[in-house]
Amino acid sequence: MTDATDITRQTLAALGVSTAADLAPHFAAVRAEFERDAATITDDATWKSLRDLWMGRKSGVLTRITDNWLKPSPPELKRVVGQELNQLRAHVEQRLDALQQTLAAAAESQTLARDRVDLSLPSVQRPLGSPHLLRQTFAEIERIFLSLGFRVVEGPEIETPYYNFEALNIPEHHPARDTMDTFYLAMPPGAEPRLLRTHTSPVQVHTMESQQPPVRIIVPGKVYRRDNPDATHSYAFHQVEGLAVDTDVTFCEFKGTVEHFVREFLGPTIKTRLRPSYFPFTEPSVEVDASCFACGGSGCRLCKNSGWIELFGAGMVDPAVYGFVNYDPERVSGYAFGLGVDRLSQLKYGIDDVQLFFQNDVRFLRQFS
Ligand code: PHE
């Protein structure tokens, strides 16, 4: 756009205007020139040049008309020039506003076009995993015991020998320590030894240390033993510890709870048998057996023709353990059990290789979702 309104550089007298009638064509010419300029606007920069050219305070066209036409005009013409000038100014302002809005709208639709999302495109198909069978078994065990009023607690996987052994009535050199081949952590010289817990039983001790009876807890968790991996062994496996201690917990309640759990977990027709066993932290100790759900008790390969399947260890809490947590063995009694989650899961779902739990092959996991 060029500053082509040359007539606004001259006075009205020089243009030969002496009446209102002479004036009109000149204002019409100026307005036509503005429209020609306005038609060339394409973006913010050209819009700004147009605004400055016409509205600029110092040397804009409108200022020029004020200086060259309005101010020097004779009194009889001044009113009409003023009116015409006001109309021109209003027109220029209104057109500049409108042009600015048109530019903004164009910019917005350009942005929208650029950022367009094609909602009809098919999405990326991500393969879905499924809940791990051990997770499902944990959940099933927790459901059964929560419905009996047990609370779920957890404990550390790194332990001191005190919690993993001593306070569970397994003193140093006790042969029971050998049966749980233990991972010890490398510690700086002089530091207290640390180990990976070989069972969830240390959480019994933590819980009783921090809470007075009644205690009814289950403890789901991971445990570690130095075993070579094969179909029935793994250096890490899973347990759910159970502990119930109160002023009147009887062997009868223990037996009833165990039977209820086995029926809920394996099925209502399954029978339970308690067999004498030994654990340093329970007295008496038992192995809980279930009647073989494969053959119904008549004898098969799964139960090695005995009709019974060994499920887990349990027993009444040995009074010696109460001594370590300052419970009064004269006042309280209770029972504990340690469920092997991997084993229970294998039995319930017929899985013959424990390694399948650790390979996380979705073809295996998917079968149980
Ligand atoms: N902690 C024992 C184990 O891992 C299991 C157990 C727990 C036995 C509680 C009796 C009572 O072998």
Image (cartoon, rainbow, N blue to C red):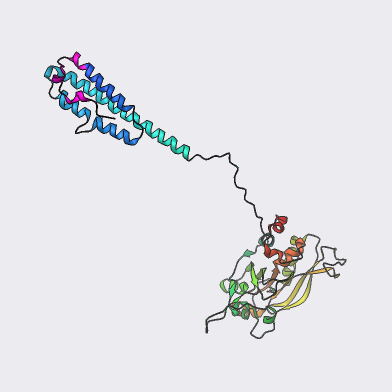
Name the foreground residue: 330 vs 64.
Answer: 64
Q: Residue furthest right?
A: 298
Name above or below for residue 69 compared with residue 257.
above
Quadrant position of ligand 1: bottom right
Write the start and end of the magenta stretch as one range: 4-23
Name above or below for residue 118 compared with residue 205.
above
> Which secondary structure dominates the residues rendered in magenta?
helix
Picture residue at 65% right of the left edge, 81% below the top: 170
Q: Assign the C terminus to one quadrant of the image.
A: bottom right
Q: Is residue 260 magenta?
A: no
State left or right for residue 68 relative to residue 33.
left
Q: Assign the N terminus to one quadrant of the image.
A: top left
Name the foreground residue: 53 vs 341.
Answer: 53
Q: Is residue 246 visible?
A: no
Picture residue at 27% right of the left edge, 24% below the top: 33
Q: Is residue 15 magenta?
A: yes
> Measured from the top left, where is residue 43 in percent x and y?
35, 34
Tell me the quarter of the picture where residue 153 sits: bottom right
Q: Is residue 11 visible?
A: yes
> Measured from the top left, where is residue 136 in percent x and y?
68, 59
Picture residue at 54% right of the left edge, 39% below the top: 118
